[in-house]
Amino acid sequence: MAVPPDNPPGAPATRDAVLACGVYVDGARLPGSWSPAEAAAEVRARGAGFVWIGLFEPDDDRIRDVAEVFGLHELAVEDAVHAHQRPKLERYDSNLFAVFKTVRYVEHESPTTTNEIVESGEIMVFLGHDHVITVRHGDHSGLATLRADLERQPERLAGGPAVVLHAIADRVVDGYLEVTEAFQGDIDLVETAVFAPRSRVGIEQVYLLKRELMELRRAAVPLAGPLRRLGDGHCGPLVPDAVRSYFRDVDDHLTRVTERVAGADELLSTLIDATTAKVSLQQNNDMRKISAWAAVIAVPTMVFGTYGMNFDTVPELHWRYGYPLVLAGTLGVCLVLYQLFKRNRWLSRPGRSGMPARPMFWVLLLLLAWLVLIATRIPRGT
């Protein structure tokens, strides 16, 4: 398993579930390496600051050790161990438990050559007055860069654990915006391909985009309620007044995301309808061609069925030119029908004019000339 990118800069890589554990006082990180228990004891002894612990896919034993130190609720702990949670915000005694779904755009050459466009992960956050504990699921949801950015802004980090929660929410929603912009590019490509002449884009490619868009919708839409609660003061002193306005700003950004998702979903539904209509139109064109050729073939079938195959210059018994006249008349009628069907675009490709196809025209004309030649070579008889 690859080491998740959550270690602080310069720290050794580790496969332990605890990727980072830092003590922050007045916005500055205290030097040294800390276990969760040591960090909690340091903060409580000082009576100031907070602990920020980063966990990656911890097992039951590891997260319960941390939960015991910070008094985390068992229901929230169970949710943090088992991924695939819906975005939510819950309050347990003196802790908040928030779930965010992260998304990542999967780079690809074209939306028609991939089976996955959006990958999702999760970040769970335990927030208390002296701690913030993040639990990550998914390799692309790393917080090392976020931690480093905040550590370069001690005046901001001095705002406490709620500042970390806001920074995580802001980073997650910014990720949604980036994915929606990239996703729109894929939709534009497919839309152009669907309406291009002789397009081979099927409904499967459009449905793939719609399915992947649903992944983004499941991440973004349920987050609106939790962000609204964080910005409206429903979380008590854990989210100070100075931080609430920032959550309202994140909520505004999320509204933009949901509007883009709704617009993209509506456009994809329209493309599915258009693709279905295009397939139906192609099938109708194919049936018209089949019907036209059946009409052309019906003429010789009727004539040859009348006279059979045993010609002796029939039709009206021993006519010298009966045989070539029957063939010439049959081919002439077929040629007329072919011309009429081409003129009415029953035998032309979509997007082309109804003019006769030159190769077929000359083939029929040569056959007619061949019949005339046969007629001139038939010996005179009684």
Image: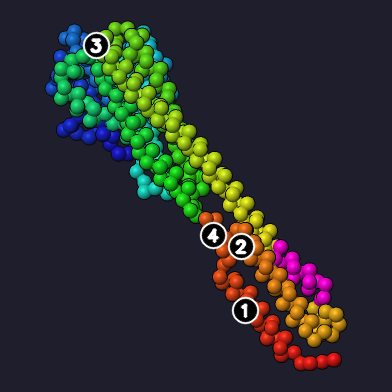
- Residue type at tag 4: Ser
The question of residue 41 being in magenta is answered with no
Please state, as top left, top right, bottom left or bottom right, where the N terminus lies in the image: top left
**Which residue matches tag 2?**
342
**Which is more toward the observer, 277 or 169?**
277
- Residue type at tag 3: Ala
From the image, state whether disc 2 or disc 3 is nearer to you.
Answer: 2
For the stretch drawn in magenta, the main secondary structure is: helix
Query: Does residue 304 lie above or below 35 as drawn?
Result: below
Q: Residue at x 83, y 72 (%)?
A: 306
- Residue type at tag 2: Lys
Q: Does residue 95 appear to the left or right of 144 in the view shown? A: right
4 and 2 marks in contact (CB < 8 Å): no
Q: Which label number is shown at residue 366?
A: 1
Q: Does residue 35 appear to the left or right of 346 in the view shown? A: left
Mark 4 closeness class: few <14, some 14–19, many ≥20 residues within 10 Å? few
Residue 160 visible? The answer is yes
**Which residue matches tag 3?**
242
Indicate the secondary structure of the residue bearing disc 3. helix
Q: CA distance from mark 1 to mark 4?
A: 24 Å
- Position in image of residue 348 (x %, y %): 58, 60
Q: Which label number is shown at residue 353?
A: 4
Q: CA distance from mark 4 to mark 3?
A: 70 Å
- Position in image of residue 266 (x %, y %): 48, 33
- Position in image of residue 361 (x %, y %): 60, 71
